[in-house]
Image: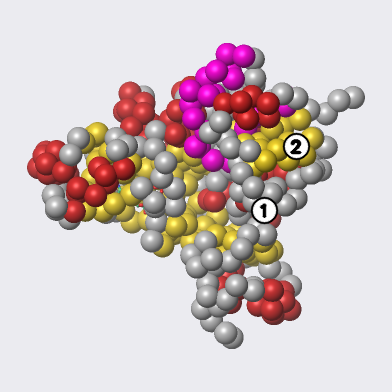
Amino acid sequence: MTFPVVGMVGGGQLARMTHEAGIPLGIRFKLLSDTPQDSAAQVVNDVVIGDYRDLETLRAFAQGCDVVTFDHEHVPAEHLRILEAEGVVIRPGIEALRHAQDKGVMRARLDEIGVPCPRHRIVTDAADVTRFAEEGAGFPVVLKTVRGGYDGKGVWVVGDETAAAEPFRAGVPVLAEEKVDFARELAANVVRSPHGQAVAYPVVESVQTDGVCDTVIAPAPELSAELSAQAQRLALRVAEELDVVGHLAVELFETRDGRILVNELAMRPHNSGHWTQDGAITSQFANHVRAVLDLPLGDPRPRAKWTVMVNVLGGDYPDMYPAYLHCMARDPGLKIHMYGKDVKPGRKVGHVNTYGDDLADVIARARHAADYLRGTITE
Ligand code: ADP
């Protein structure tokens, strides 16, 4: 019996946790990582150190992989097209991936299939941003470089034409969007296999601070059954229409009048799904591996009434270990996940999952641990 080799491009924490999920599945895991210090490179034994922007490196890496998948969306599409033509199995495929790599392509496609999005269009310069505002969106306008953004980098909220000049400096096309006055942000996470099997996780609420995901609550509190089902159906439909294979995160805005609009798509395990490691029968990482290998998918249902994830961001203290000991001693029910990354202010270095029946308590415990680890509280 030969168990397949999953090749993962990108050595961040998503790769590290996907590798972890692959261990009990018995699959073999090969990693292409920038440096040996990267989060996943520290723990994967079959690692190639190299540059994912280099075609030859990618080509050599793909040799011996049964399937190649990704922990980020920055691999050049032209390289993937060549590899796909040479017979490398890439999942999600390049046609699907284009929509996660380019926000302009994503918006155009969602319009085409009638998925509700914020009002938007590609803008050419600052004066064009003013025209976009005058067409009905009004200032402030949200500007996004169509490629290369993450964690709010590549996103600007501009109040006037003068401020609108900045995003154009990168030389990348810019997408303008109306600034949605949302009630909250949600994520509908689904996993789809090449067979067309798909599973939907409970819709979660995600709280961002300064463009970075801070807290995720599963399921989203007080979300009506109707809106929840609508969000799940929407995500499943996007996965099918775009032929996504693997985990698809659909980031949503819930408007104050009870509608949902799509903000973003991510075709890989996603921060809004980290809660599934401890809170779902099958984690997003395990299901991503199962999907890219076209294995039957695992049960996405929750194990607890509430699961909460809070990201651990770096603070001013480079050594989190003493704080980590304290948190473990104080609350043996915490599920702490650390990524092995150097602590830098604001950097995601881990997350804490908690679960239980009392939502306020579950939130408070995860929040406390994350704040204590960061060093923003001392008790
Ligand atoms: P990234 O690719 O960096 O994750 P996103 O497009 O997800 O960028 O934007 C980051 C955050 O900025 C969102 O989670 C949301 O809080 C805010 N944001 C993005 N687009 C809009 C919008 N059109 N209206 C209001 N807020 C927005």
Is residue 73 rendered magenta in the image?
A: yes
Q: Is residue 322 visible?
A: yes
Residue most extreme to the right = 1
* 2 or 1: tag closer to the N-terminus: 2
Tell me if residue 347 comes above or below residue 331 in the rendering. Answer: above
Instruction: Quadrant for residue 190, please give it.
Output: top right
Q: Tell me if mark 2 has few (under 14), some (14-19) or many (20+) residues whose alpha carbon lies within 10 angstroms of its own.
A: many
**Residue that numbered label 1 is attached to:** 37
The range drawn in magenta is 65-86
Where is residue 173 shown, x and y percent of the image? 29, 35
Residue depicted at 76% across the width and 30% down the height: 5
- The spot of residue 269 in percent (x, y) is 58, 43
* Quadrant position of the C terminus in the picture: bottom right
User: What residue do we see at 53% from left, 81% from top?
Assistant: 377
Is residue 257 inside the magenta stretch?
no
Q: Position of residue 337 (x, y in %)?
A: 67, 60
Q: Which residue is mark 2?
A: 29
- How far is the residue under mark 2 from the one under mark 1? 17 Å
Give whichever of 40, 19 is nearer the camera.
40
Left or right, 137 with reference to 283:
left
Residue type at the position of mark 1: Gln
